[in-house]
Amino acid sequence: MSERRFNEAEVAAIFERATEAQQPGLRGSSSSTDGMTLAQLQEIGRDVGIPAESIALAARSIGQVQPSASRTVLGLPLGVARTVNLDRKLSDDEWERFVVDLRETFNAPGNVRSEGSLRQWTNGNLQALLEPTSTGHRVRLRTIKGDALGMIVGGIGMLGASATMLIAAAARGALGDKGMLMALTFMGLTGVGMFASSAIRLPAWAKTRRQQMEEVAARLAASTTTPTSDDAKPSSRSERETT
């Protein structure tokens, strides 16, 4: 089995978690397009004085981030999603810091809502959902390019309608009507333009959103590999008296 390689966003998160304050210049240390192995990360860590155990602990947290099925249409990425399974529950302070990270990463204020144990941050179609699990919390990040589906379906519809009408005109022997031909041509070209504009923009949009989600997910997973300060405190008066 080949050894796992970590991408650039994961490398940055690993070093940030291992040092509790990211070392200058390490974000760009992943120059290989194939990523870096744990051994390579530990070698870099030794060069800057970071224990190999700290690198390994931080790297384990990256495994909590899982890609979710992304929605596609005609092979084009219409939606992007990521899931982070945490081994413990987020504290109120950690959730608030996560919301700050979301706002800074996506450059969007968004709105925060709570329903019982469920929490969410939304900005249009962009969502971050915090859900309880048997072992802690799960965070689902997801978004969809809302206007793209209408443009694609509308473009295909206009192109199909113009082609159908053109075939019908040919069957009637009405192709000599230049006005009708110009109108059908314009309709068809408009449909092609609507489809092409979305098809060209969607891959770049999805790549940006995917990278942003990977970054915030990696930072969240790395920040929760150790118990919170609240977890380390005695939970009751009797416990404090026995310590």
Image (cartoon, grey):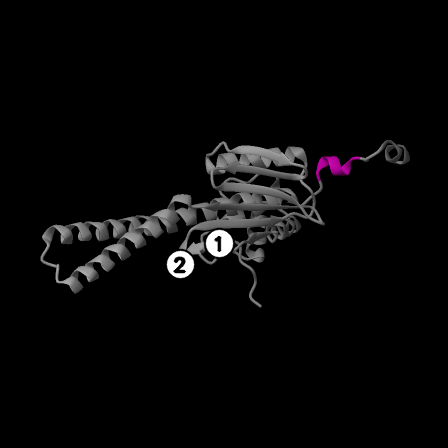
Q: Quadrant of the C terminus?
A: top right
Query: Does 232 appear in magenta?
Result: yes
Element assignment for label 2: loop
* Label 2 crowd (10 A; few <14 / some 14-19 / many >=20): few
Residue found at x 72% / y 35%: 229
From the top left corner, tell me how far across and down residue 22 is, in percent. 56, 40
Q: Amino acid at mark 2?
A: Gly
Residue range (magenta) = 228-233
Q: Amino acid at mark 1?
A: Ser
Residue 169 vs residue 4, the one in the foreground = 169
Instruction: Find the distance from the CA under tag 2 to the CA under tag 1.
Output: 11 Å
Q: Give the left or right position of residue 171, taking residue 48 as reference.
A: left
- Magenta span: predominant SS is helix
- Name the disc covering residue 17, or none: none
Query: Does 33 appear in magenta?
Result: no
From the top left corner, tell me how far across and down residue 77 is, in percent. 42, 53
- From the viewer's perspective, is residue 137 above or below residue 39? above
Residue 184 vs residue 174, the one in the foreground = 174
From the top left corner, tell me how far across and down residue 37 is, in percent. 55, 57
* Label 1 crowd (10 A; few <14 / some 14-19 / many >=20): some
Residue 27 visible (yes or no): no
Q: Give the left or right position of residue 117, taking residue 27 as reference.
A: right
- Name the disc covering residue 70, or none: 1
The residue under label 2 is 75
Q: Quadrant of the N terminus?
A: bottom right
Element assignment for label 1: loop
Q: Give the left or right position of residue 149, taking residue 94 as reference.
A: left
Question: Which badge, 2 or 1, is on the more N-terminal residue?
Answer: 1
Residue found at x 54% / y 54%: 68
From the top left corner, tell me how far across and down residue 27 is, in percent. 49, 44
Residue 169 vs residue 218, the one in the foreground = 169
Residue found at x 58% / y 38%: 120
